[in-house]
Image (cartoon, grey):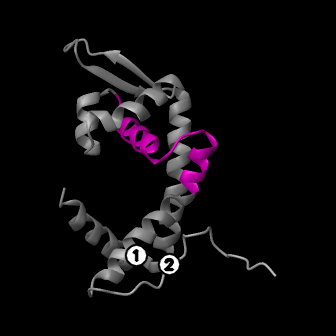
Amino acid sequence: MQKTVPHAAGLHRASLRKLHDLDAALELMYYGWRGMTLSADQYLATLGLSRPHHRILYVVARQPGVSIGSLIEILGISKQALNRPLNLLLERKLLTSRRSPEQHRSKLLRLTEAGKRCEQRASDHERKVVSEAFDRVGPRGAAAWMAVMGAIADNN
């Protein structure tokens, strides 16, 4: 008889041995991230895209006309790491690139209508997960989560 798995393989929280008092918090970060991005990543996979593509679309949606140099800085990645996913998004016509009128060596990125739809749909999957979690923990829990994540994000 075959055993059924209630969640996607590998996505359940493992019973890992704790080596430090904060290991449980670290594991919740890892599993929480995977839980939040699972549906979005599944959607992106149907388009032949992945997490790096979504991160690019997410930033460009919120900063239309961002330069490639600024995008690299915002994402905290190298030019080499950006190259492949950026080129695919340009080939798929989810992004456009044009020369800056002020700095001709700089390229400015914008989402196409298809890119806007793709970004919105992927982000909607993530917003739904966060919204449902905030509903479960209430306003005080949501505020506490925002405060903790803000403090962690400040490490950047």
Q: CA distance from mark 2 to mark 1?
A: 8 Å
Q: Which amino acid lies under the numbered mark 2 shown in the image of this protein? A: Arg
Q: Which amino acid lies under the numbered mark 1 shown in the image of this protein? A: Leu
**Placement of 134 over or under 62, stated as above or below:** below
Left or right of residue 102: residue 145? right
Q: Position of residue 89 (x, y in %)?
A: 48, 30
User: What's the residue at 44%, 69% (across, down)?
Assistant: 32
Does residue 25 belong to the magenta stretch?
A: no
Q: Position of residue 97 (x, y in %)?
A: 38, 20
**Placement of 148 over or under 102, stated as above or below:** below
- Which of the pair 57/81 is nearer the observer? 81
User: What's the residue at 50%, 29% (across, down)?
Assistant: 94
- Which of the pair 143/15 is nearer the observer? 15
Q: Which mark is residue 28?
A: 1
Q: Residues within 10 Å of mark 1 (few under 14, many from 20)?
A: few
- State whether the magenta stretch is mostly helix, strand or loop: helix
- Answer with the quarter of the image where residue 64 lies: top left
Q: Nearer the viewer, mark 2 or mark 1?
A: 2
Secondary structure at numbered mark 2: loop
Most extreme residue toward the front, as rendered? 1
Q: Position of residue 112 (x, y in %)?
A: 49, 26
User: What's the residue at 33%, 79% (across, down)?
Assistant: 25
**Placement of 74 over or under 151, stated as above or below:** above
Where is the N terminus found, in terms of image quarters? bottom right
- Chain-order first, disc 2 or disc 1: 2
Does residue 61 belong to the magenta stretch?
A: yes
Left or right of residue 131: residue 77? left
Where is the C terminus found, in terms of image quarters? bottom left
Q: For the magenta stretch, what is the residue range? A: 39-64
User: What's the residue at 68%, 75% (across, down)?
Assistant: 5
Secondary structure at numbered mark 1: helix
Q: Which mark is residue 13?
A: 2
